[in-house]
Image (cartoon, rainbow, N blue to C red):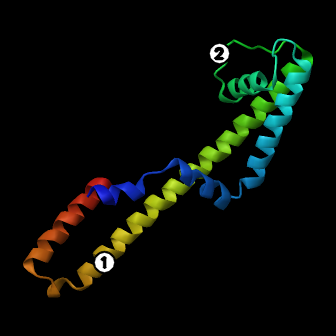
Amino acid sequence: MREEAKPNRLKFRAIGPVIKAAGLLPWTAVFVALFLVCAFLVTMFEPGVDGFGNSLWFLFQVVTTIGLGDYTATSTVGRLVAVVLSVYSAFFLALITGAVVSYCSERMRARRDESVAYFIDQLEHLPELSHDELVELSKQVKRFDRMR
């Protein structure tokens, strides 16, 4: 039973193919490029953020809306960069979330359809099933009904 559940879990590495299948690779490339350009701009124009690494950290806080407060934008360029990146990242993260939800829904729908097809096949051959097979089919139907 444990091995059956393992392939159905969404793994982090499965997000890449989902993004690719959903056609979100260009959006992802733009996000990464925008993030790096913004980090460069913050490094150049934001006096309170010293170094590229700290710029990356500051923008990570902007994107994730953590806002720890260890870095804040005080310059016009820094504030504009933070606004542009936060708006784009909110949109981008919503797209990714939608793609993952759609993928999971499709997987669940496919599993349900496979189960229904299996039950229909078993019902078509009902007279040919042994008593033990009928008992097992009954258990499977009850499990399927509880999952709905």
Q: Which residue in the structure is indicated by mark 2?
A: 68
- Give the number of marks: 2
Query: At 41% across and 58% down in the image, what residue appears?
Result: 7
Q: Amino acid at mark 1?
A: Ile
The residue tagged with tag 1: helix, strand or loop?
helix
Which disc is residue 81 wearing? Answer: none
Nearer the camera: disc 1 or disc 2: 2
Query: At 36% across and 75% down in the image, what residue appears?
Result: 117
Q: In the figure, residue 35 lies in which quadrant?
A: top right
Taking the view exactly as shown, the residue that stands out farthest to the left is: 131
Query: At 22% across and 85% down in the image, what residue appears?
Result: 125
Q: Nearer the viewer, residue 70 or 141?
A: 70
Identify the mark nearer the N-term, 1 or 2.
Answer: 2
Above or below 49: residue 90: below
- Where's residue 68, x and y in %? 65, 15
Q: Residues within 10 Å of mark 1 (few under 14, many from 20)?
A: few
In the picture, the quarter occupied by the N terminus is: bottom left
Q: Nearer the viewer, residue 95 or 29?
A: 29
- Where's residue 82, x and y in %? 80, 25
In the picture, the quarter occupied by the C terminus is: bottom left
Q: Which residue in the structure is indicated by mark 1?
A: 120
Query: At 57% across and 50% down in the image, what residue appears?
Result: 100
Above or below 121: residue 27: above
Real-space CA distance between mark 1 and mark 2, rounded to the nearest whole angstrom: 56 Å
Q: In the figure, residue 70 lies in which quadrant?
A: top right
- Where's residue 128, x and y in %? 16, 88
Q: Are marks 1 and 2 in contact (CB under 8 Å)?
A: no
Above or below 97: residue 2: below
Q: Amino acid at mark 2?
A: Leu
- Where's residue 123, x and y in %? 24, 80
Horizontal arrangement in the rendering, residue 105 relative to residue 56 (left or right): left
Q: Residues within 10 Å of mark 2 (few under 14, many from 20)?
A: few
